[in-house]
Amino acid sequence: MITLGEIFRQYGPAYRAKYGSRLTASQRAAMAAIEQCRTEALGGQVYTCPQCGTLRYSYHSCRNRHCPTCQHGQAQNWLAQQQELLLPVPSFRVTFTLPAQLRAVARQHPRCLYALLFRSSATALQQLAADPRFAQGAPGGQIGMVGVLQTWTRDLRYHPHIHYLVPAGAFISSEGRWEPAKGRFLVHVKPLAKLFRGKMRAGLQQMKLDVPVPAEVWGKAWVVDCRAVGSGEAALKYLAPYIFRVALSNNRLESMANDQVTFRYRVGESTKTKRCTLPVEAFIGRFLQHVLPKGFVKVRYFGLFSPSRRAVLAEVRALLGVRMSEAAEGTGEVQVTVVAKEQQERVRCCPVCGAVMEVTMVLVPTSRGPP
C-alpha cells in the first residue's frame, strides 16, 4: 500500500527546492516529520523472538499531528476522555463556513483568521442562544460548545469551517435550572449567520485585514448549518474522527505513477466514491495547505464546556442525574492508554510463532529536525 510518507520521501526534496520559499515553518516541519516517520531516521528497537529467532524492526513514529500514520487510534482515546463531559440530552451540530472570498486572507494569515473564526462563531452562537426571540433557551442561558476546525473538503480543496457540538438546552444560573430546547430546534440559522458575519467583519477591521476583502461578501448570505444529531454520545462519536483526522489518510491513496497521485474520496453524504488524479506537485500542495500553524489549537471548548467552568458543568450534570468522576473533576480529562498498550503488545508478538519477543537492540536516530 502506498503511503504519504513514501510520496514525500520520493518527491519532497524536489518540491522544497522549487517551492521552499513559499512554505511556512510548520509546513516544512510536517513534511520532514512525515518523511522520517517509522524509518531508521528516528531510531527504534530490534525485537528478537527467543523461540524461533525471528527479528522485527520497530521504528519510532514522528507524532506529528498532520501525519496520517501517527493519528491512527487517537480518536478513540479522545472519545473516552470526553465521556465525563456528556450531558444526557439530545445534541445539535452547528457548522460555520468561511466564505470563499475570505479564503485568500485565511491562507496568508491562518493563525489570526482561524482564531477569529472560532471567536466570532462561538460568541454569535452563545449570544443568539440566550435571545428569546431566536432560541428555545431562556434569556441569559449558558450553553455548552465543543468546536473543531476543519480546513479541507474530501478532495483536499481549501474549505475552512468549524463544527460545534451543542447540547440541546441552556443552564439558567440565576435560577439554578436546566432549560431544554424544544423539539428539533436550537436557533434560527439566518439571524445566526448575519450575527456571525458581523462579528467576522468587525474582527477583520480591528486587525486591519479587511482591505483585500471584496465588498460584496458583506451583503451575501453566509452559510451556517444547524441540525439535530441525536444523543450526546452519538454526537461525540460523530465528532471524534474530525478531532484527529488529517486531510488524507493512507488508506485512501490508490497509486503513484508517472509523477501523478490518485486517491479516492466520498461524494457528499452519499456512499458514491470518486477518484482524483493530480500531478504530484499539485497533490503535495493541496495537502500542505491544511497544515496548521505551530501550536494552534484546533479543538476548543466554550460555555459550559470551558475548562474554567467545570464546576458549573458538574452542577448541571447533577441536575440532570449524572456526576463527574474524581479524575474529571480534578483535571478535566481521563488518561487512556488502552490503544498504546494494544499497539505495544502487537509489536512484541512474534509474527511467526506467536511468542513474546524481546528487545535486543536500540537503534539510535540518524537524523533530527527538518532537512
Image (tube, grey):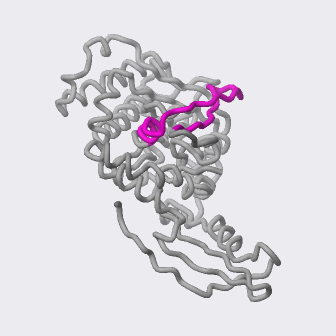
- Report the quarter where the C terminus lies: bottom left
Does the magenta run of residues contain 368? Answer: no
> 45 or 215, which is in the foreground?
45
> How many labels, in total?
0
Question: Horizontally, is 141 left or right of 92 in the view?
Answer: left
Is 13 drawn above or below residue 357 in the view shown?
above
> 106 or 201, which is in the foreground?
106
Q: Examine the image and state in which quarter residue 229 appears.
A: top right
Image point (43%, 59%), residue name:
33
> 240 or 130, which is in the foreground?
240
**x, y percentage for residue 10?**
48, 52
What's the magenta region? 260-287
Question: Horizontally, is 64 left or right of 324 in the view?
Answer: left
Is 47 drawn above or below residue 329 in the view shown?
below
Does the magenta run of residues contain 278? Answer: yes
Residue 323 visible? The answer is no
